[in-house]
Image: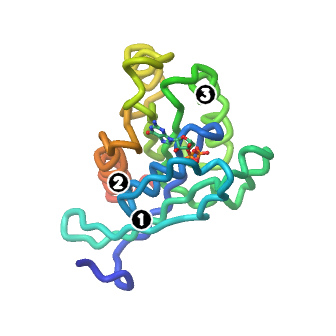
């Protein structure tokens, strides 16, 4: 168990994407290993923290959720300020949520350093057999062209959730060690 109080680095990470793509559930799955069947009416938490260790360094990851503010186009610059990594989420069953990633990326770039690691996440992989609307190839190509890492995840059954977050943290750590963030 790593102490919550002592850490070498504090990572602020933001999760963005259209409403309903599963941002709050990805965060909940990663930090508490839980899932909410119906979270439509809930306003998410502002952020959750997770303590981890990379290369003998104690890291406190503070992961910020939009808390539903995106519904009202009310994300403030304070939300992005100081972010050293971002997860851009779309829903593999909703094509518009994939097309909107471009706008999210643009907004993110206005508020953060160009060098911050970005992860594109296609969520709701558990629904891929019947409801897939965005192909893996298309999304992977988009991610490569935009310089993002790419994962397809399911917050529902946990597939790739830890991998997506931990790969992001490894990249943030590498960038910080190079003093580029
Ligand atoms: P947010 O608005 O982006 O934070 O999305 P939420 O986390 O609130 O999720 C929106 C809805 O999608 C809720 O009804 C969730 O139960 C559902 N959901 C989220 N992630 C998944 C997933 O991986 N698979 C499935 N089947 N449903 C999901």
Q: Position of residue 46 (x, y in %)?
A: 61, 64
The residue at 44%/63% (across/down) is 11
Q: Secondary structure at mark 2?
A: helix
Task: State the quadrant of the N terminus.
Answer: bottom left
The residue tagged 3 is 97
Q: Residues within 10 Å of mark 2 (few under 14, many from 20)?
A: many
**Furthest residue to the left?**
56
N-term-proximal mark, 2 vs 3? 3
The x, y position of residue 89, in whole percent, is 52, 37
Return the x and y of residue 36 as percentages of the image width and height: 50, 52
Q: Secondary structure at mark 1?
A: strand
Which residue is drawn at the image coordinates 52% and 30% (left, top)?
91
Kindly tell me whether mark 2's CB lies below 8 Å from ligand 1: no
From the image, tell me which residue sits under label 2: 169
Q: CA distance from mark 2 to mark 3?
A: 24 Å
Residue at image location 48% in from the left, 44% down from the top = 87
User: Which one is nearer the viewer's eye here, 165 or 40?
Assistant: 40
Vertical comparison of 50 with 86: above or below:
below
- Label annotation for residue 12: none
Query: Colour scheme of this structure image?
Result: rainbow
Residue 165 horizontal/vertical position (percent): 36, 50
Badge 1 density bin: few <14, some 14–19, many ≥20, Cα 10 Å: many
> Residue at left 39%, top 62%?
31
Occupied quadrant, residue 65:
bottom right
Which mark is on residue 61?
Answer: 1
The relative height of residue 7 versus residue 13 in the rendered view (above or below) is below
Q: CA distance from mark 1 to mark 2?
A: 8 Å
Q: Point out the tag, 3 or 1, that comes first from the N-terminus.
A: 1
Q: Label 3 near label 2: C-beta < 8 Å?
A: no
Sooner in the amino-acid sequence: mark 1 or mark 2: 1
């Amino acid at each position: 168990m790593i102490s919550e109080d002592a850490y070498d680095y504090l990572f602020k990470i933001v999760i963005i994407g259209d409403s309903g793509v599963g941002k709050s559930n990805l965060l909940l799955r990663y930090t508490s290993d839980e899932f909410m069947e119906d979270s439509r009416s809930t306003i998410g938490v502002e952020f959750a923290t997770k303590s981890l260790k990379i290369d003998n360094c104690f890291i406190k990851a503070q992961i910020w959720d939009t808390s539903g503010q995106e519904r009202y186009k009310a994300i403030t610059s304070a939300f992005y300020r100081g972010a050293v990594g971002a997860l851009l989420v779309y829903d593999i069953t909703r094509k518009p949520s994939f097309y909107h990633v471009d706008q999210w990326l643009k907004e993110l770039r206005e508020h953060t350093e160009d060098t911050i690691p970005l992860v594109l996440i296609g969520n709701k992989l558990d629904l891929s057999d019947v409801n897939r609307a965005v192909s893996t190839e298309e999304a992977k190509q988009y991610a490569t062209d935009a310089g993002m890492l790419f994962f397809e995840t399911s917050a529902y059954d946990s597939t790739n959730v830890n991998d997506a977050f931990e790969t992001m943290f490894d990249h943030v750590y590498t960038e910080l060690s190079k003093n580029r963030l």
